[in-house]
Every structure is written in C-alpha cells, then in structure tokens.
Amino acid sequence: MPQAGALRAVLAFPSTYSVGITSLGYQVVWATLARRSDVDVRRLFTDQGDPPHGGGRGRGGQVDLFGLSLSWELDGPVLLELLERQRIPIWASERGDADPIVFGGGPVLTANPEPLAPFLDAVLLGDGELLLPAFLDALLACRDAPRPERLRRLAQVPGVYVPGLYAPRYGAGGALLGIVPTEAGIPATVAKQTWRGNTLSHSAVITPEAAWPSIHMVEVVRSCPELCRFCLASYLTLPFRTPSLDDGLIPAVEKGLAATRRLGLLGASVTQHPQFADLLAWLDQDRFEDTRVSVSSVRAATVTPELGRILARRGSKSLTIAIESGSERMRRVVNKKLATEEIHAAARYALEGGLTGLKLYGMVGLPTEEEADVEATAELLLAVKKATPGLRLSLGVSTFVPKAHTPFQWQGVRPEAEKRLKLLARRLKPKGIELRPESYGWSVIQALLSRSDRRLAPVIAAARGRHESLGGWKQAYRAVLAGEHEPAPSRTADTPPPPPWEEVIHATWSAERVLPWQHLEGPLAQATLQRHAEEALGSGTATAAPAPV
C-alpha cells in the first residue's frame, strides 16, 4: 500500500493490455515499482489503464514520473500519443518543474535511444533489477528540487542516460562527430548495467486476458552463448546467465503453478541451461499431469527424443528452432554453429517424441548472401518435410536489420531481400510448408529507427497518427528533409537535416564512422565487435559487401 506522499508514477506500454501484460519485462518493472511503499504506480496501455492519481498539479496529469517499456522499434510514435493523453509535453526541452520525469527502458532504448532521445528525460540502460531501484532512490532524494537539478542528479546514477545533458556535434556534410556532455561533471559515456544475481524473472500477473492466456512465464536463461553476429538478444544482454535449479527455477515455477496450470519457459536458448534436462525430468512427474508447458526457441542441436516426449506429454504441439539459413556457408558467416544433420535430427526427434509441428526461423538479406543461399533454405525445408512425413513445418522468415552493439551494426538492409522473400514463397507454399514472412517494407522502417540519431525525432513526431502505414513514414521523412515540418525545439541553427534515406537504411558504414550510440557502452568494445565482423565476413567465399560510407 503506497504511503502518504508517495511518488506518483505511471508505467506505460505502447500497445493494448493483452499484449502489454504478456511482456515479462513490463511485468517485472511494474512489480518492482508496486512493491515500494514510497511509489504509487498506475499502469497505462493504449486501450485501458488503472484509475488515475487523484489531486495533484501541473500539465502531467498529477504524475511525478512517467515510464515506458519499449521492446519494438516501430512502437516509438505510440510514446508520443501516450504522453499527449496524459497532457505531458512530448518534447523534453518544453517540460517544466510541474511536469513529470519521463523515462524509458527496454532493449530498443538500451541499444540506441537517440531517435527518441529528445522526448525522454532519462533512459535506463540495461537490466532493471539494480538499475531501477537506484534510479528511484536518486529521484526521491531530490524530488522537490528544480527540474534541472533533478536531471543532473539522475545523470550520476550508473546506467542512467539523461539525453538533455548531452549534445550531438556535426561536421561537414552532416557527419556525426560525437555526442558529448554539455556541462562539467556529466559522464562522457554511460555504461549498460548488468544484473548478475542468482535469480531471473517470472510473472507477477497471471490473467486470462493476456495474449497468452493464464500463463506463468519463467525466465530460464538471459542472453545466449552462441553470439550469432546479427543478434541483439545475444550481444546486448551478455553475459549468458542461468539461475540455479533448486534456488531459482523450481521455486519460481512452483509459485506460478499455485495459480495456473500453464507454464511458459522463456529465453533465447532455454535448452542451453546446464540443468535443463533436470528441470524437464522434474516436470515429468505425475503431479504435473494437468500442466501445459510451452518452451520458447530452443537450439536445434539440443533437441532429443526425451525433450519431445516430455513436452508432448505436457501439452506442447510443436518446437521452435532458429536455423537462420539453409546454407551451411551462411550459417558460418553468422556464427550459427549448426550442421544440416542437426536440423534433420531435431525434426526426427520432435516427431518421435510425439510433437506434431516444427517451427523454424530464418533470415534473408544477410551480409554476403547470394540467391543460391536462399535456394538452399528452400531445399532444406523440402528435404526435412520429405524425411519426416506427418510433421507440420512452418518457416518464419525476416529481412536482416542491423542492430546496435552487434558485429553487423555497420551493414545495411539489402534491397534484394524483398525478392528473396518471394522466392521462398514460390518454392515452399505449393509444397504445403507454411511461410510466415515479415514485411520487407516494415523491416526498412525498423532499420531507420534502429540506425538513426536524434535528427530522426522530428520524423517520429511528424509520423504520429499515420505511423501504421509505410507511406506515412516515408511522407514524414520527406517532409522533415525538405524543412516542411516543425523541427525539434532543441534543434540549433547548425543542426543538419537527417541523412539521406539510402545512407541510413541501405549503406554499409565504415568502421571509422562515429555511430549514434557510440557514447553508450554495451557489453563488448567496438574493437571486439569489429573483429567479430571481420571474422564473419571473411568466413564465406561470396562477394564482399558494398563499399562503406
């Protein structure tokens, strides 16, 4: 129960309640806030929210703190709509003492917050277990101070990035030269914070209204040890962490199964937990007969008949594995340590265990990819289907999008990916293999958001209300480029316009280029990422990438 005078907070999610409440990250942040007696937190979604705080002051709807969890680049404009609904100025530079501190977190903002930086007072970089309490303690200690003083205090908390205390510097032709502090005493760089405790997260809310109804989610692993060269979920969240079975996983599972009989085991590669076989054996007990267990993506090489049998016995219908490409050459390029025979074995073991489906995930448009590599993906799927009759196959396929803090951050989106998605459709659909392609056009917009600096903020503002269409984004970009839309209030006379569309999305960048997120420290140094990139691009025999810019 919040105490008198508690900090009034709103925690928002840029989607509907059913989607937002299914996000384990959102649940964990909300639970962390709700457990504190010095914080009175209310939830907000695009379709509903908790009752607002009563009384209060200012344009911010009687709120001291407004937070947003962002896990998808394309949800950025929804932040602005949520702020407007709360009567909070969307631009951080226009907020005064009576307005709330607006903060954000999640993988998108930890990777590259710059496109949304002018809308945010603070960005929490990394894991929330230690970062969020330190942020709240710092804010409570200075809550009555003038706004600039509060922001300076927050900037001293490790992992808290206050964009308003940093300014971009540009050179000839609009090249970004760096993002530097505007005052003495502000850290030159901000490092992502990493939780190294023995326990990870699990559901705080179980509801039939969630997108996955009445499910208790348990985080089995965090990060992934495989280090596929494009993978944000692996590189950004290093090191690979696993809670213990007896002190971490089993108590978390038992707690949830007291309320529901549906269990979701989450992680980028859950079967690589060193005690996963023991966890499965524990779940194989007769007392879990009425429990339905689902597992997120597993590493193909770890699939066994026993895994298939136990999951089938616990209500699972299918397994999900990421193969990235049917081409062994491409799998070497991306560091996917997976042999073709291991993919076939995973399908056989899934079928032998009693599962009826196998979901595979892959990509097109990866660096150095040729059409023959995409043909190899189609051939692999057809061969697996022939070898395992009765197993329902589906392929989810996306276009490669460069992500910050990964070795492929310097690579661009390849336009030929669009026709390669169509190639897979022609080859697989007539043979009864379900194809679930992600839109190439939306991958382009995702790259725009993942690769830009703060000059994109006016585009995001201009796209507001029409961001659900590709045409709306393109019109907004052209309008800002042509000076036809109001610029960000913090824009100075020497701020250049956004770079050309082609340069942001499709160009291969040189290793010497200053990146928009270079002042934000990820788990690995830029030199290490560059070495991984060089190793990857030298591991195949295909044509080299286009000349960098």
Image (spheres, grey):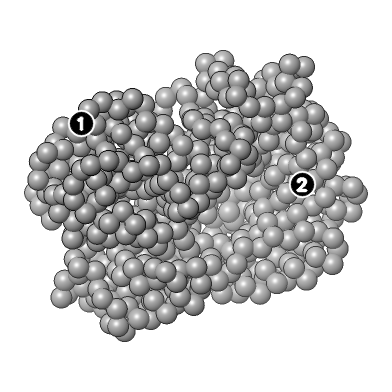
Q: Is residue 260 left or right of residue 176?
A: right
Vertical relation: 79 (above or below) 208: below
Q: Amino acid at mark 2?
A: Leu
Name which residue lies at 54% across and 60% down: 537
Residue 255 drawn at (x, y percent): 56, 20
Residue 20 drawn at (x, y percent): 50, 46
Q: Nearer the viewer, residue 260 or 276?
A: 260
Q: Amino acid at mark 1?
A: Gly
Vertical relation: 384 (above or below) 192: below
Residue pointed to by mark 2:
358
Real-space CA distance between mark 2 and mark 1, rounded to the nearest whole angstrom:
53 Å
Number of the front mark, 2 or 1: 1
Image quadrant holding the C terminus, namely bottom left
Res. 113 mark: none
List the single residue furthest toward the front: 55
Q: Is residue 265 visible?
A: no
Q: Is residue 30 visible?
A: yes
- How packed mark 1 is, by other alpha carbons closer than 10 Å (few <14, some 14-19, many 20 or more), is few
Disc with the residue nearer the chain's start (2 vs 1): 1
Name which residue lies at 58% across and 49% down: 335
Residue pointed to by mark 1:
5
